[in-house]
Image (cartoon, rainbow, N blue to C red):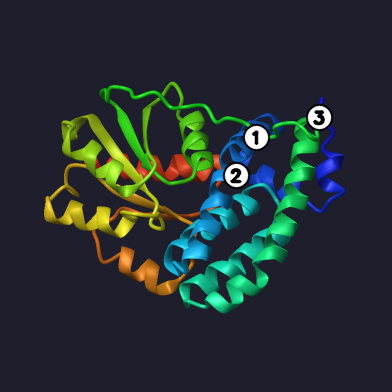
């Protein structure tokens, strides 16, 4: 059995995380997913920093901020949040000046997590994330669009056996799925707003242009609490919006509410 005191003694708020994940088994499963994708996110943050691409830098560190908050790494989450804000205001000076400190704290916390997970120090510590196979979209499907593997897999676990969860990691993948699927097979879509490449607002605009809202009801899942972003989302005929992090009961409530819109 893993020793949760390794996390707690290093300032990780496991109790708060369990409000999202429910139990330690799910927490550990999602933590493994996090370790499987965090190195790629960090590499992308460095790439965008070095390019001076603050818009995409902000998107990547936003995702890392959310991950940290999911797992109770609150202080590190606040550091990523400061970088997200700097990226949004195009403050490359702050990003470059503070990046090494951010990475030092990130490495420290990742080492704590790896020790808890039993990853051997000095070995190849990366965990390869499970690849999601391409699956046929069947009746009673819901589409989850989010660049976080953690969120996608958590929702898939919640609805296992009730709905077929189809996942898209970005807006373009979602549009491709929608445009090549009989709309009556998809009961609803859960859509993140802040994604690299084609973002959630571009997906919403595609829905509006193609008159799809009446066929596939949409609710938003977002880590943003920016008033302008929220107000902009509600200019589209979405059903509801849920803030990350959310727990199982809340996401079930939103999904059922969204599906009811399709069938009413």
The crowding category of the residue bearing disc 2, from other C-alpha atoms within 10 Å (few below 14, some 14 to 19, many at least 20), is few
- Most foreground residue, 173 or 136: 173
Q: Residue furthest front?
A: 50
* The N terminus sits in image quarter: top right
Earlier in the chain: of badge 1 and badge 2, it is 2
Answer whether labels 1 and 2 touch (C-beta < 8 Å): yes
Residue to which mark 1 is pinned: 126
User: Alpha-carbon distance for marks 3 and 1?
Assistant: 18 Å
On the image, the x and y values in percent for residue 240 come to 36, 54
Q: Residue at 29% x, 42% y: name it.
A: 174
- Most foreground residue, 116 or 213: 116
On the question of residue 75 being in view, the answer is yes
On the image, the x and y values in percent for residue 61 come to 55, 59
On the question of residue 263 being in view, the answer is no
Residue to which mark 2 is pinned: 39
User: Alpha-carbon distance for marks 1 and 2?
Assistant: 8 Å
Answer whether labels 2 and 3 touch (C-beta < 8 Å): no
* The C terminus sits in image quarter: top left
Residue to which mark 3 is pinned: 2
């Amino acid at each position: 059995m893993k020793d949760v005191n390794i996390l707690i003694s290093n300032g990780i708020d496991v109790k708060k995380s369990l409000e999202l994940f429910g139990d330690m088994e799910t927490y550990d499963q999602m933590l493994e997913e996090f370790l499987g994708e965090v190195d790629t996110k960090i590499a992308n943050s460095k790439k965008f920093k070095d390019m001076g691409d603050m818009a995409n830098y902000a998107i990547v560190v936003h995702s890392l901020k959310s991950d940290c908050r999911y797992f109770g790494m609150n202080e590190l989450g606040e550091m990523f949040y400061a970088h997200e804000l700097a990226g949004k205001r195009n403050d490359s000076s702050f990003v470059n000046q503070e990046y090494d400190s951010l990475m030092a704290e990130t490495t420290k916390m990742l080492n704590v997590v790896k020790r808890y997970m039993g990853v051997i120090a000095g070995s190849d510590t990366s965990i390869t994330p499970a690849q999601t196979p391409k699956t046929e979209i069947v009746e009673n499907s819901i589409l989850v669009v989010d660049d976080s593997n953690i969120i996608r897999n958590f929702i898939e676990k919640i609805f296992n056996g009730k709905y077929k969860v189809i996942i898209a990691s970005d807006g373009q993948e979602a549009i491709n799925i929608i445009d090549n699927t009989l709309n009556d097979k998809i009961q609803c879509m859960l859509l993140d707003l802040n994604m690299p490449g084609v973002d959630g607002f571009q997906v919403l605009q595609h829905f509006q242009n193609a008159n799809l809202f009446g066929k596939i009801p949409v609710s938003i899942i977002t880590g943003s609490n920016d008033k302008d972003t929220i107000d902009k989302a509600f200019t589209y005929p979405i059903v509801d919006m849920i803030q990350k992090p959310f727990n199982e009961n809340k996401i079930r409530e939103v999904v059922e509410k969204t599906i009811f819109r399709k069938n009413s």
